[in-house]
Image (spheres, rainbow, N blue to C red):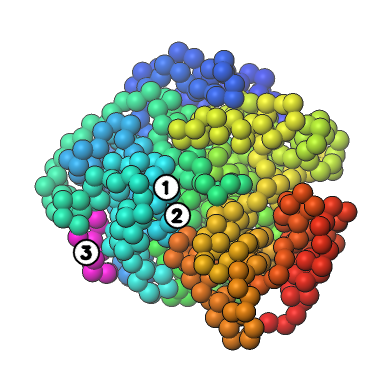
């Protein structure tokens, strides 16, 4: 493999698409072989491995029982409740069947949705794998989201069952989940028939008679459960995962089964170089796409042990992750630039305290990797640092360095080159023309069909899939990532930020429209604009500018601060603290064009101390001036 030039490998993946993916498909088990590699007769809807039948849970768990039943599969470490539990493949297999039997007992059937609203505990992994086992479609909602976010996802997914827990814990503080879930179900139009509760004994909760089931009791009944894998078509949806976009309503990214299994298995070999029997440690959360692909499915498909970590990177001290690397001989690690920036502020001695010789590389993704952060961690670890650029929509990297194909150097500030299977183009936003020359700025786009593992459609909304992703570039049916980028003369891409209203706070993708809708629900808010502003630690933070219905409420600094706090609380309660803006400022007017369009990019520029650019269409320049002065003024 090492003798293949990456450029040739990439070219073949596009020119001999079916041959290439047929080879990769051999990395997983098929119950029934596929008859067609890719059906793209109805663009942009791609169907991969048509006619084939498989099962994600079989490939992630059962398949390894023959070769590695007693090797570690799931290593759960919680520094929140001071527990460590290790499940071998045999034990994981048993736990997944107990969970699967419990879900079946609650009436879950193939194709039904199961919403998972859980902290980072093993039962969350069991629930995901159990769904895959019985052909149910899981929809994990990040535990940091609150009731209004949760309610909108419940209404869209219409789950038969919600799996949840009494509470999570953060920094040693109990964070109750159940009251938020109860409130979400109260708000939602759709009512799940059952809630399956994992009671950690952290927070007492009210049990809803006839609806809430206790997992410990059900598990006890199904200790010896044998639940065979349900073979499903390769195109059967494995899960949906909600993500933010330009509108306030989150989109359910729908993933298939066969394509996803093949894509992840291939990525474990060609990108992450993770080998069976080794340990993979991704510091993400199961509520995000990285958690789906690289805490749960990817490592398990590869026959690796995966670490699921509940806790902060700096507690009990900033050496905790490195301690785990030493203890479990982690070979592949995956994190986000924000986490590295947090560690960078701590004592560097923690990095030399542990034996990190097992570690081959650290992969980072989710947000731009700035040069100082990349340099610091590369020097401190003395290991390759590999940036990955991708999206919830794609499920696995679009841009990176595929060291499993050909070792190649990284360039600071660049996530690397187009990954095999992806026909990445830079297009002019106005004309749709391809920008072929080096260092030209354009929209990062992907020519269809999207490779295996990428989103099939928007859950129950094919039209939205086409209209959102495939119609934004004039006169071309091409997938838009909604990111700006450039490519240098060597084919390395540089990502320059989103073209839409999505912001990235500490690697968490948020829609400014959702935050605006939440703020606007405060009785004194007439109008509001939320923009993402560069932040040294978190990459970006949300800044809100609100016009009040009754400005007489904020005539003193104390009153202003009080109202700001009140509004933040609204966001905390509705969406969750992840979406809370760093500041809410009050203005008399928002900068708009004469046709009434909010000038978000101008507000963002002013907040970042940049030139707002062309303002010829602005209705009243004083609106932007006020924001400029507010931002410049000391708090
Ligand atoms: O703007 C890009 C940014 O995060 C977006 C996708 O976020 P999400 O759906 O949460 O998926 C994260 C999967 C890793 C992208 O549209 N982004 C992601 N990775 C990078 C990045 N920006 C710069 N460099 C990256 N490596």
Q: Label 2 neighbourhood size at 10 Å, few (<14), some (14-19), many (20+)?
A: many
- Where is residue 571? Give x, y as percent: 50, 65
Tag 2 secondary structure: helix
Q: Is residue 533 above or below residue 123?
A: below
Q: Distance between the residues labelled 1 and 2?
A: 7 Å
> Between residues 43 and 468, which one lies in front from this camera angle?
468
Circle on res. 149:
2
Mark 3–mark 1 Cα distance, whole angstroms, equals 22 Å
Q: Is mark 1 within 8 Å of ligand 1?
A: no
Q: In the image, which disc is placed on residue 397?
A: none
Please give the residue where the numbered disc 1 appears in the rendered image.
Answer: 153
Span shown in magenta: 197-207
Instruction: State if disc 2 and disc 1 touch (CB < 8 Å).
Output: yes
Q: Earlier in the sequence, mark 2 or mark 3?
A: 2
Res 590 visible: yes
Q: Mark 3 points at which residue?
A: 206
Q: Residue 543: give x, y in percent of width and height.
A: 65, 66
Residue lying furthest top: 35
Measured as percent of width and height from the top left, residue 523 is found at 52, 67
Q: What is the spatial separation of the Cα atoms under label 2 and label 3, in whole angstroms?
A: 21 Å
| Residue sitting at x 58%, y 83% | 559
């Amino acid at each position: 493999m090492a003798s293949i030039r990456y450029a040739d490998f990439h070219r073949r993946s596009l020119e001999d698409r079916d041959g290439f993916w047929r080879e990769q498909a051999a990395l997983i088990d098929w119950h029934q072989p596929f008859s067609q590699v890719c059906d793209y007769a109805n663009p942009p809807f791609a169907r991969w491995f048509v006619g084939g039948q498989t099962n994600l849970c079989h490939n992630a768990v059962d398949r390894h029982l023959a070769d590695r039943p007693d090797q570690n599969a799931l290593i759960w470490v919680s520094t929140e409740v001071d527990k460590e539990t290790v499940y071998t493949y045999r034990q994981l297999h048993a736990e997944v069947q107990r969970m699967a039997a419990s879900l079946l007992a609650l009436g879950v059937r193939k194709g039904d949705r199961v919403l998972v609203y859980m902290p980072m505990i093993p039962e969350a992994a069991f629930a995901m794998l159990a769904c895959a086992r019985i052909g149910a479609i899981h929809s994990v909602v990040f535990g940091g989201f609150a009731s209004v976010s949760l309610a909108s996802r419940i209404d869209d997914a219409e789950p038969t069952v919600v799996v949840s827990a009494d509470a999570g814990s953060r920094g040693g503080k109990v964070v109750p989940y159940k009251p938020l879930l109860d409130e979400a179900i109260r708000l939602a139009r759709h009512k799940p028939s059952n809630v399956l509760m994992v009671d950690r004994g952290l927070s007492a909760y009210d049990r809803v008679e006839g609806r809430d089931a206790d997992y410990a009791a059900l598990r006890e009944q199904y200790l010896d459960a044998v639940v065979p894998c349900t073979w499903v078509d390769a195109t059967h949806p494995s899960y949906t995962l909600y993500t933010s976009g330009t509108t306030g309503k989150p989109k359910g990214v729908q993933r298939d089964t066969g394509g996803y299994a093949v894509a992840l298995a291939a990525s474990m070999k060609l990108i992450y170089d993770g080998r069976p029997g080794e340990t993979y440690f991704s510091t993400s959360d199961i509520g995000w796409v990285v958690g789906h692909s690289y805490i749960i499915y990817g490592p398990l498909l590869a026959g690796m042990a995966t670490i699921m970590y509940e806790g902060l990177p700096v507690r009990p001290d900033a050496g905790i992750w490195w301690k785990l690397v030493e203890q479990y001989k982690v070979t592949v690690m995956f994190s986000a630039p924000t986490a590295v920036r947090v560690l960078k502020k701590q004592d560097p001695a923690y990095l030399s305290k542990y034996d990190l010789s097992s570690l081959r590389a650290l992969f980072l993704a989710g947000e731009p990797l700035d040069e100082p952060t990349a340099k610091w961690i590369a020097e401190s670890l003395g290991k390759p640092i590999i940036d990955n650029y991708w999206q919830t929509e794609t499920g696995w990297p679009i841009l990176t360095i595929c060291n499993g194909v050909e070792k190649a150097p990284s360039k600071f500030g660049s996530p690397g080159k187009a990954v095999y299977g992806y026909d990445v183009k830079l297009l002019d936003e106005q004309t749709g023309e391809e920008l072929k020359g080096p260092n030209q700025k354009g929209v990062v786009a992907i020519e269809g069909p999207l490779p295996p593992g990428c989103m099939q459609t928007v859950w129950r909304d094919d039209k939205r899939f086409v209209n959102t992703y495939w119609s934004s570039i004039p006169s071309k049916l091409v997938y838009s990532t909604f990111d700006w980028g450039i490519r240098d003369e060597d084919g390395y891409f540089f990502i320059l930020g989103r073209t839409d209203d999505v912001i990235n706070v500490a690697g968490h993708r948020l829609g400014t429209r959702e935050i605006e809708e939440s703020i606007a629900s405060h009785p004194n808010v007439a109008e509001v604009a939320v923009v993402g502003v560069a932040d040294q630690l978190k990459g970006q933070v949300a800044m809100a500018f609100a016009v009040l219905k009754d400005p007489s409420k904020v005539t003193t600094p104390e009153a202003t601060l009080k109202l700001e706090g009140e509004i933040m609380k609204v966001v905390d309660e509705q969406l969750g603290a992840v979406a809370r803006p760093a500041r809410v400022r009050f203005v008399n007017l928002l900068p708009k064009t004469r046709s009434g369009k909010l000038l978000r990019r101008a507000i963002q520029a002013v907040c970042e101390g940049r030139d707002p650019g062309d303002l010829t269409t602005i209705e009243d320049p004083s609106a932007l001036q006020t924001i400029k002065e507010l931002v410049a003024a000391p708090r």
